[in-house]
Image (cartoon, rainbow, N blue to C red):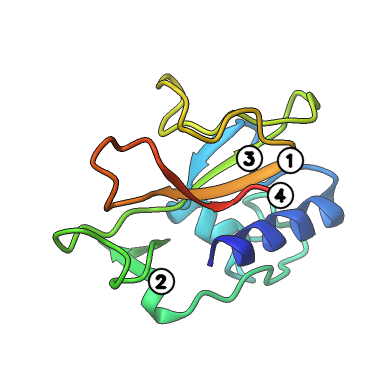
Amino acid sequence: MAESIKTAVNAYYAEYSAYPTNVSFIKTDSQFYSALCTTTNTNGGNTRGILFLEVPSKCTLTNGTSPEIVVPSGFCRNGARSNFFVMFDQANQGYLVPNTNAGSTSLTNKMVASSVAVWVVDPYDDTGKKAVGTFK
């Protein structure tokens, strides 16, 4: 799923010459979902109404009425499903330093040579610092 999200973000970038957000770090929440996974959000950045990503039902969770992209139920600890993290190289540095939120310390994967990184924190790593996802 992480690779599919990354491919969709790159397709979005190829179409609009911009990432689906103007910040460098996001989660796959309802706003991200509506930008990449629907054809009706034509005023929310996806002005051409292109479906960039089809999400299998095992990777969606409806939070109220807004769907979000989450890890499959088999990839969680104690039943807690989490969103994927997405980071963009908005500054054109040629690398990313994945972290669990915009102000946190880095995960174990440092200075990843990529323009887009998508990951989740490994639920079976008790340190909370191991990332699982796509970094190439």
Determine which quarter of the picture holds residue 22: top right
Callout 2 secondary element = helix
Task: Evaluate if marks 1 and 4 touch, with contact meaning CB atoms under 8 Å apart.
Answer: yes
Q: What label sits on residue 21 in the rendered view? A: 3
| Residue 106 higher or lower than 60, as above or below | above
Task: Evaluate if marks 2 and 3 touch, with contact meaning CB atoms under 8 Å apart.
Answer: no
Q: From mark 1 to mark 3, how far is it between C-alphas?
A: 17 Å
Residue 57 picture location, percent across and down: 40, 80
Q: Is residue 26 left or right of residue 134?
A: left
The residue labelled by disc 2 is 59
Q: Earlier in the sequence, mark 2 or mark 3?
A: 3
Tag 1: amino acid: Ser
Q: Tell me the residue at 26%/61% (across/down).
A: 76
Q: From mark 1 to mark 2, how far is it between C-alphas?
A: 24 Å
Q: What label sits on residue 114 in the rendered view? A: 1
Which is more foreground, mark 2 or mark 3? 2
The residue labelled by disc 4 is 136
Which is more foreground, mark 4 or mark 3? 4
